[in-house]
Image: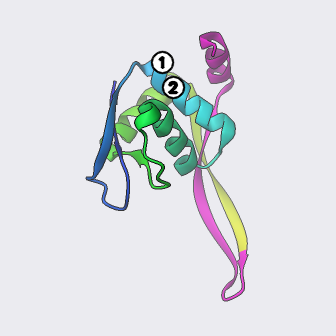
Amino acid sequence: MRLDMTAGYNPKKSVGTSDCTLQAAFKAVAEGALVYREEAEVLRFAAKLLLGPTAPNDNSLNFDQASLNALRRELMLYALIEIGSEDRTHFNPANGNVTRTVSVWKLTDYGRRQLAAIGP
């Protein structure tokens, strides 16, 4: 599986590529899902794991759209993750309560068992 990563607000600015197996990609996403819940944070963590020491320390690190679509499709096809949405509300003094909907990536029970079987 070939996954391209981007950084910054220019989605065409490639910062690296990872040629990895589906197992390695799943493990990176699963580790991210154990630490974070929101899609952007999970994927940023996974991208850093897959790029290794060459990963830029950039909060905008992400997968390019084609890689993200392929990764999402494979992980959902094999029932390793589930993607849902949650509403997050925070108070903003200027506007009062502001609610936004975020995508949440979670491991399925099957995904947790597969991660445990892969090991460290």
Can see residue 19?
yes
Q: Quadrant of residue 11?
A: bottom left
Based on the picture, tell me whether residue 106 belongs to the magenta stretch.
Answer: yes
Q: Quadrant of residue 107?
A: top right
Query: Which three-letter amino acid code belongs to the residue tagged 2?
Result: Phe
Q: Quadrant of residue 29?
A: top right
Residue placed under numbered mark 1 in the picture = 23
Based on the picture, tell me whether residue 6 belongs to the magenta stretch.
Answer: no
Front one among 32 and 82: 32
Characterize the local packing of mark 2: few (<14), some (14-19) or many (20 or more) Cα atoms within 10 angstroms.
many
Magenta part of the chain: 91-120
From this viewpoint, which residue is outermost toward the left?
Answer: 12
* Residue 13 versus residue 52 in the image, above or below: below
Residue placed under numbered mark 2 in the picture = 26
On the image, the x and y values in percent for residue 84 come to: 60, 45
- Pointers 2 and 1 in contact (CB under 8 A)? yes
Front one among 31 and 69: 31
Query: Which three-letter amino acid code belongs to the residue tagged 1?
Result: Gln
At 54% from the left edge and 24% from the top edge, which residue is drawn? 27
Can see residue 72?
no
On the image, the x and y values in percent for residue 15 come to: 32, 45
Characterize the local packing of mark 1: few (<14), some (14-19) or many (20 or more) Cα atoms within 10 angstroms.
some
At 64% from the left edge and 10% from the top edge, which residue is drawn? 117
At 72% from the left edge and 71% from the top edge, which residue is drawn? 90
- Point out the image quarter for the N terminus: top left
C-alpha distance separating marks 2 and 1: 5 Å
From this viewpoint, which residue is outermost toward the bottom?
Answer: 94
On the image, the x and y values in percent for residue 24 come to: 47, 21
* Residue 100 versus residue 74 in the image, above or below: below
Front one among 75 and 120: 120
Find numbered disc 2 in the image and state the secondary structure of the residue it sits on: helix
